Image (tube, rainbow, N blue to C red):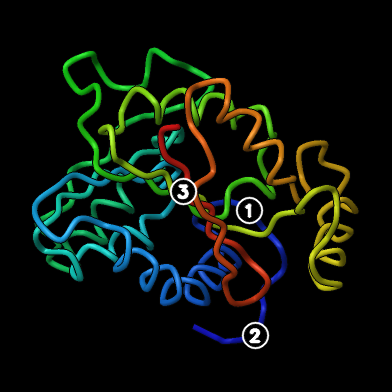
Amino acid sequence: MSQDKPPLNPHPLSEYVAWAGNRNREPILGILKEKLPIDSGKVLEMASGSGMHINFFAPHFEHLHFHPTDKDIEVFDNIKQLSVDHANDNIADPVHLDLTEPDTWFNPGDKSSFDAIFCINIFQVAPISIADGMMECASHLLNDDGILLIYGPFQVKGRFTTGSNEEFHKTLSSYEVPEWGLKDVADLEKAAANHGMVLKEIIDMPANNFSLIFGRG
């Protein structure tokens, strides 16, 4: 695939999303190697999209079992095909999970069964309102010492941390899609507090992104 930046397109199977995913996967893998369990465990990805990330990470953690999810079932075949192509036998079949629909957040028997949850590059093209569902869902599904990792570009205390992030925000806003734009970390913290979750750590990442690590308060 060309290294040139494709036109912005948030569809999970677009060239743009694939380009962005190839740029960020190694740095995120480094964080996961620090944060995921060293023994057995279960890891859930919210908004798995094409499945590019979970299929890249899984071979590095053969002792863990990964669970892809997405609200759009149209991407499920792609996720499963990548798992076959990469011979990733520690990835479950994808499951429908919509953060606006609590009925999709797994059954009660799955409550508090995940050691980690991660979500990559969602909030710049998703409404901040899904943060409440994400935090409530995580509070139900995570073990007591489990973590929620959210990766992407954000504002911090109402400010852009770099000029390039401000330009990215302006580019997103120019499409006049109401939910597009960089959200503020403070709004995620507010949603977390409503469900007994707190921001444990904020990690600077390449390309002016952040990894936000949430856990129980």
For this view, does 86 lie left or right of residue 105? left
The image shows residue 130 at horizontal and vertical percentages of: 60, 29
Q: Are marks 1 and 2 in contact (CB under 8 Å)?
A: no
Q: Secondary structure at mark 2?
A: loop
Q: What mark, if any, has residue 4 been given in the picture?
A: 2
The residue at 63%/37% (across/down) is: 188
* Relative depth, front residue between 54 and 143: 143
Q: Nearer the viewer, residue 207 or 156?
A: 156
- Mark 3 belongs to which amino acid? Cys
Tell me if mark 3 has few (under 14), some (14-19) or many (20+) residues whose alpha carbon lies within 10 angstroms of its own.
Answer: many
Q: Measuring 85% from the left and 55% from the top, which residue is drawn there? A: 159
Reply above or below: 162 against 13: below
Q: Which mark is residue 119?
A: 3
Residue occupied by mark 1: 10
Q: Residues within 10 Å of mark 2 (few under 14, many from 20)?
A: few
The reply to whether residue 143 is in sight is: yes
Above or below 15: residue 35: above
Residue 79 in the image, given as x and y percentages of width and height: 31, 52
